[in-house]
Image (spheres, rainbow, N blue to C red):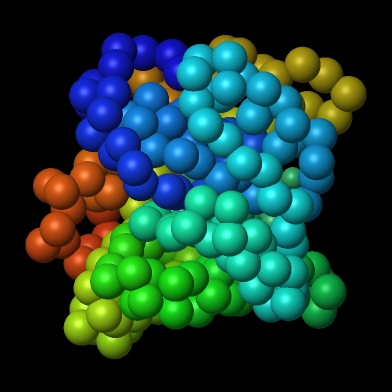
Amino acid sequence: MSGPRIFAPDLLAGKVALVTGGGTGIGFGIASCLSAAGATVAIASRKPEHLAAAADLLRSEGGTVTTVETNVREPETVGRMVEHVAAEHGRIDLLVNNAAGNFYAPSATLSPNAWRAVVETDLYGTFYCSQAVHPVMKAQGGGRIVSISMTLHYRGWPLMAHATAAKAGVDALTRTLALEWAGDGITVNAIAPGPIPTEGVKKAFTPPGEAPDVPAMDGYVARAIPVGRWGRPEDVGHLVTFLASPAGDWITGSIFVVDGGSWLAGDRR
Ligand code: NAP
């Protein structure tokens, strides 16, 4: 994990966290922060190579890590993922719905398959995973769910109809599940990150066949991110850690923007 250690290394000792898409990008940053705070972490996604490399890194820093291959679009494999983690570790205290995928595409010609792929991953996947952990969390007396949303649907974002519609659904789901499951001791919140240059975001600044356009990336920061730097995966990971800790006991149904002020600034790329 890069950057200073913010939280005590035993803050989440004894807690078990399941992070979907935890092998790459923001998900890996979240898994790193949780692990650094003492949680046992299960990371889940489709590609074993993503999971193996991330698990090696976390273990090299002293973390206790499990990997689970899953596809969040498929409720049956999601069910098996949750069974596997609960059987191995005896409980699941935190689910982070981070897995997602998107790409720029004009709405006028977006194919039904492309639409379905993004909405099923970002929205249906969030619901399937949340529904699957519910009985485990209820039986153990409570738990936390944090879903990773975005800010682009606050104003609308051309070429991202699928992802903005899906993430607006994630926000709605967050508020509704928070109310339905509060009585089961389960808090449900979401975090809406601003621009964090993971591989997908870098691609938007990379002309075909070339390296990322660094001046364009620097120009974007100067124009669009008031605090003057790109986000880092651990900017999100630290807030997830806070929400997973006792400090998060009375927080539910909230959607936290973590974006260096960029959605308020309102720039278009
Ligand atoms: P990323 O590196 O592409 O991460 C996406 C992760 O999801 C990958 O680990 C991928 O692993 C996994 N995944 C994709 N489809 C899956 C499926 N069907 N089943 C299981 N796992 C799946 O992207 P990121 O930028 O870190 O994004 C992480 C989250 O932050 C997403 O929810 C995204 O919408 C949100 N976000 C990102 C930004 C940003 O600027 N980066 C801004 C706002 C919101 P496999 O390929 O191994 O399945």
To which quarter of the image does residue 54 belong?
Answer: top right
Q: Is residue 201 above or below residue 254?
A: above
Q: Nearer the viewer, residue 206 or 67?
A: 67
**In the rendering, at what x and y percent does residue 193 appear?**
39, 45
Task: List the single residue furthest toward the right.
Answer: 209
**In the rendering, at what x and y percent does residue 147 appear?**
42, 59
**In the rendering, at what x and y percent does residue 22 appear?**
58, 42
Kindly identify the residue that appears in the image at 66 percent across and 18 percent down: 213
Q: Specify whether 168 is left or right of 47.
A: left
Q: Nearer the viewer, residue 5 or 156?
A: 5
Kindly identify the residue that appears in the image at 28 percent across and 23 percent down: 9
To which quarter of the image does residue 258 belong?
Answer: top left
**In the rendering, at what x and y percent does residue 200 appear?**
67, 38
Kindly identify the residue that appears in the image at 35 percent across and 46 percent down: 15
Q: Nearer the viewer, residue 79 or 31?
A: 79
Kindly identify the residue that appears in the image at 65 percent across and 50 percent down: 44
Residue 31 seen: yes
To which quarter of the image does residue 249 belong?
Answer: bottom left
Q: Is residue 2 above or below residue 189?
A: above
Q: How many marks?
A: 0
Q: Specify whether 163 is left or right of 143.
A: right
Q: Is residue 163 above or below residue 38?
A: below
